[in-house]
Amino acid sequence: MILYKSVENSNLELPSNPLFYVRYENYKEITFTIRPIVSNSVFQEAFGIYLLPGFSGDVFVNGEKVHLSKSKWKNLIFWETKGMFKFWSDSQPEKEYVINIKIKKGNVAIDNGYDSDNHTENNNLYCETIGKLFILETISDNEFIMRCGNADNLKCFDDLVLYLKVELGEEMDL
C-alpha cells in the first residue's frame, strides 16, 4: 500500500496535490533510483528516505550495504551538489543512486528537505515536517519527476527537481 500525505484545507495558494511525503507500507523490497535534474535554490537541497520506527532489514546504496544506526529513526539523506547527489558528507558525489531496501519489518517513506544553515556535515535534514513540499509528475507507472519546494517560497516547485524510479517488490503477508 502507498499512502500520500497531502496538503488539504490550506489557506495557501498551491499547485494541485502538493505532498509532504509518500509512505510505502507492507512491501518486502523497494528499490529507488534517484538522479538530480536541476536545483534552483539558494539552500542545500536533499532527497530523504526514512526507515520508520520499527524498521528492520537491510539497505544497499549503489550495491554496498549500509550499516544502519540503532536509533529509532533511521534516515538516508542524499544532498544535491552541483547536479549530483552526495550520500555521506565525506563521500564522492554520484550522478545517480540506486537504493535497494530489503524489509523484514516496518515501513519506508520518502520526502524532500533542505538545510538553510549549512549543517550537511552532520547528515541532518532540516525542515523535516514543515516548510517543504513536493509534487510528483508521472512519467510511467513507476517513474516520476519530483518537483520540490521550500519554505522560502511555497509557490515555487523548482528548488530541486529530480528523477525518481520506484520498484516495489512483493507485498508482505499480513
Image (cartoon, rainbow, N blue to C red):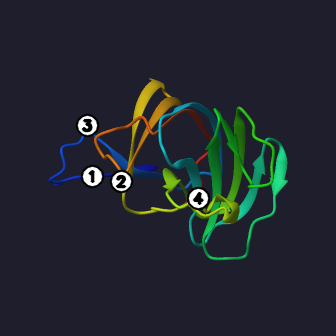
Q: Does label 2 or label 4 sit earlier along the sequence?
A: 4
Answer with the quarter of the image where residue 26 lies: bottom right
Residue at the image point whose x is 81% and y is 43% from the top: 92
Residue 50, horizontal then vertical, whole percent: 58, 59
Amino acid type at circle 4 is: Asn
**Position in image of residue 145 (x %, y %):** 48, 30
Residue annotated with mark 3: 15
Residue 75: give x, y in percent of width and height: 63, 62
Amino acid of disc 1: Val
What kind of residue is marked 2? Answer: Ala
Q: Position of residue 157 (x, y in %)?
A: 37, 37
C-alpha distance separating marks 4 and 3: 28 Å
Asked if one can make out residue 150 in the rendered structure from this viewpoint, the answer is yes
Instruction: Kindly report the distance in space between the C-alpha atoms of the residues bearing marks 2 and 1.
Output: 14 Å
Tell me the SS state at disc 2.
loop
- How packed mark 3 is, by other alpha carbons closer than 10 Å (few <14, some 14-19, many 20 or more), is few
> Is residue 118 positioned above or below 55 on the image?
above
Task: Give the residue number, with chain letter if any, for mark 1.
Answer: 7
The reply to whether callout 2 and callout 1 are in contact (CB within 8 Å) is no
Q: Tell which circle, 3 or 2, labels the residue nearer the N-terminal end.
A: 3
* Numbered tag placed on residue 151 in the rendering: 2
Q: Nearer the viewer, residue 154 or 171?
A: 154
Q: CA distance from mark 3 to mark 1?
A: 10 Å
Horizontal relation, residue 102 to residue 4: left or right: right
Q: Which circle, 2 or 1, is nearer the viewer?
A: 2
